């Protein structure tokens, strides 16, 4: 098919199923009411359960008790339609902490502490996520959910309707603040390694109390984005396996107090949330009605995307070169959930509709793509190493410059030469843009940067010095050799080492975020168990610079 026909095809308006946002226009402010279930104690994190409301109750025994200390007087309660309040379940509640919870696929997932009498060596009570099932119309004793990320706090679970996507809060290493939000997927009866939701959602403070509404919206509370340090509620759409476009909810949902623990009813026209605003108790639960449902379909158009190919060593443009564009259809890849490694590894063999574009005399080509689809860019040019990338129109930059590595046989040795001295590096300023640094060398199995291999970081330093408002995120990647958890930790340390280099030269720490991705985003075929050359493994070891935009 000719390129002009393809461009016309992809310019057709398509439906992108998403949900409406909670704005001032649809809020019935006069309907705001404090529920009668509230007492002089703390009631928070409500969830609709048919005609009833389940919630967390914290009984304050004395003035020193605080719901943030982790006392054992947390219970899950049920407020029934007849106005009576009772324990949700004798088997669910215990002498330990039972906290925020969610229901999905006939299961209950809840926050629960380790035994008060069996604290950690540091004498700290740890929060974990537990699962309970219904047997003969009765909830069973909760069992620990195994999350493959180490011994950290895991709490506040929320899931999609099918129960195979879970979002939760944790203080695991590699985060952006105190408590971050993570996502994990249920595959073959086991939860995958959690993925951080990123700096667009997670702040330097606490980001928690998530609620996944109708598989398409995430609500959460954060004290890191607010000006006065209290908890505010935020909403972000979930599109194409990504959370994009965070907005702060308006008044009267948010105020000058802690507002958190929001949930939405099935019809999408009523919400419950917790707040410390003045009332009869400490934290109380409020109901608010909406004039229209937020569980409605919305529409989006296509976007224009351009690619330019250049030679990595000479910086020369690569004209008249083909790029294969493969729309990602999970069924074509034999997948139920998005899996970056499997998609990149199987793109050559998949039987999927694809099309080719050819770069012009400037090494560029622009085309139009659907916003509700991810794409694989597959580049196999004679004389260059094969490259594979995943492009998401909703979160990635609309302009890419891809540096192609010449396919020359060479013996790789640990060297002190600086390849970046002979290569022109341009640091973009548009938010969302990315630059890949592939010549920041570290000592083997270490996060220590070789002193003579900092040329690319020096270029970044000069750019940030010239633009005092520029903020960036350093994202370090490893190859697939070694254990996944170790690679994740090592890459996080390497990202921090690159951040320290910039800070030591005078860049403010608030302008630089650092994150390690380990082996989660391999960009060629060198996945676990695949035999590859040292050069091919090195291709996966890189540090990406993501432009976050101007500093507020």
Image (cartoon, rainbow, N blue to C red):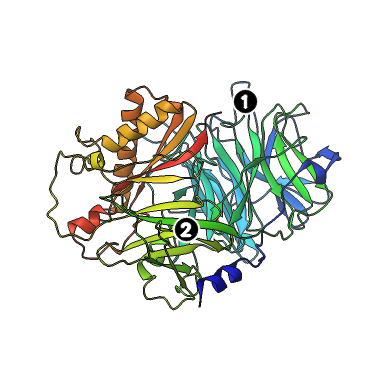
**Where in the figure is residue 121, as x and y percent of width and height?**
35, 33
Real-space Cα separation, disc 1 to disc 2, in angstroms:
34 Å
Q: Quadrant of the C terminus?
A: top right
**Where in the figure is residue 321, as x and y percent of width and height?**
37, 65
Q: Quadrant of residue 233?
A: top right
Q: Quadrant of residue 238?
A: bottom right
**Where in the figure is residue 349, as x and y percent of width and height?**
37, 76
Pick the residue in front: 83 or 278: 278
23 lies left or right of 229: right
Checking the image for residue 391, the label placed there is 2
Pick the residue in front: 330 or 113: 330
Categorize mark 1 by other alpha carbons within 10 Å: few (<14), some (14-19), many (20+).
Answer: few
Earlier along the polypeptide chain: callout 1 or callout 2? 1
Q: In the displayed structure, would residue 72 be above or below residue 301?
A: above
Farthest front residue?
Answer: 361
| Residue at 12% across, 54% down | 411
Checking the image for residue 189, the label placed there is none
356 lies left or right of 373: left
Q: Which residue is mark 1?
A: 227
Categorize mark 2 by other alpha carbons within 10 Å: few (<14), some (14-19), many (20+).
Answer: many
Pick the residue in front: 29 or 531: 531
């Amino acid at each position: 098919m000719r390129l002009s026909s393809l461009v016309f095809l992809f310019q057709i308006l398509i439906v992108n199923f998403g949900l409406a946002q909670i704005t001032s226009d649809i809020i019935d402010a006069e309907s705001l009411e404090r529920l009668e279930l509230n007492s002089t104690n703390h009631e928070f994190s409500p969830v609709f359960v048919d005609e009833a409301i389940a919630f967390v109750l914290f009984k304050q025994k004395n003035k020193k008790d605080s719901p943030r200390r982790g006392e054992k007087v947390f219970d899950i309660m049920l407020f029934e339609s007849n106005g009576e309040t009772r324990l949700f379940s004798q088997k669910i509640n215990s002498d330990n902490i039972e906290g925020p919870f969610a229901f999905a696929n006939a299961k209950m997932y809840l926050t629960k502490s380790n035994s008060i009498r069996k604290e950690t060596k540091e004498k700290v009570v740890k929060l974990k996520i537990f699962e309970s099932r219904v047997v003969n119309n009765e909830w069973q004793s909760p069992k620990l959910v195994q999350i493959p990320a180490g011994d950290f706090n895991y709490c506040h679970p929320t899931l999609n309707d099918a129960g195979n996507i879970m979002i939760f809060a944790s203080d695991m290493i590699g985060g952006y603040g105190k408590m971050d939000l993570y996502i994990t997927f249920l595959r073959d009866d086991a939860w995958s390694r959690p993925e951080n939701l990123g700096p667009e959602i997670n702040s330097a403070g606490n980001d928690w109390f998530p609620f996944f509404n109708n598989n398409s919206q995430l609500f959460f509370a954060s004290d890191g984005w607010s000006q006065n340090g209290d908890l505010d509620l935020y909403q972000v759409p979930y599109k194409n396996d990504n959370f994009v476009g965070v907005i702060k909810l308006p008044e009267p949902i948010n105020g000058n107090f802690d507002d958190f623990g929001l949930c939405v009813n099935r019809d999408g026209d009523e919400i419950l949330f917790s707040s410390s605003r003045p009332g009869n108790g400490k934290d109380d639960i409020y109901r608010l009605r909406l004039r229209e449902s937020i569980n409605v379909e919305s529409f989006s158009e296509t976007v224009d995307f351009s690619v330019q190919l250049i030679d990595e060593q000479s910086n020369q443009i690569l004209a008249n070169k083909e790029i294969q564009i493969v729309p990602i259809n999970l069924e074509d890849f034999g997948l139920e959930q998005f899996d970056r490694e499997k998609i990149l590894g199987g793109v050559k063999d998949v039987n999927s509709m694809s099309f080719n574009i050819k770069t012009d005399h400037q090494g560029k080509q622009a085309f139009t793509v659907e916003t509700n689809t991810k794409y694989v860019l597959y580049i196999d040019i004679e004389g260059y190493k094969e490259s594979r990338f995943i492009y998401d129109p909703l979160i990635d930059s609309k302009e890419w410059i891809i540096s192609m590595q010449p396919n020359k046989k060479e013996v790789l040795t640990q060297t002190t030469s600086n390849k970046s001295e002979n290569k022109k590096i341009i640091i973009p300023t548009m938010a969302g843009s990315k630059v890949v640094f592939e010549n920041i060398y570290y000592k083997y199995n270490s996060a220590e940067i070789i002193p003579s291999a900092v040329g690319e970081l020096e270029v970044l330093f000069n750019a940030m010095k010239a633009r005092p408002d520029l903020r960036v995120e350093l994202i370090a990647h490893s190859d697939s050799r070694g254990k996944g958890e170790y690679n994740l930790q090592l890459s996080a340390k390497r990202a921090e080492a690159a951040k320290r280099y910039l800070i030591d030269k005078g860049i403010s720490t608030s302008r630089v975020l650092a994150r390690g991705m380990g082996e989660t985003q391999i960009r060629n075929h060198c996945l676990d168990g695949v035999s590859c050359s040292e050069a091919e493994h090195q291709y996966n070891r890189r540090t990406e610079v993501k432009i976050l935009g101007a500093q507020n």
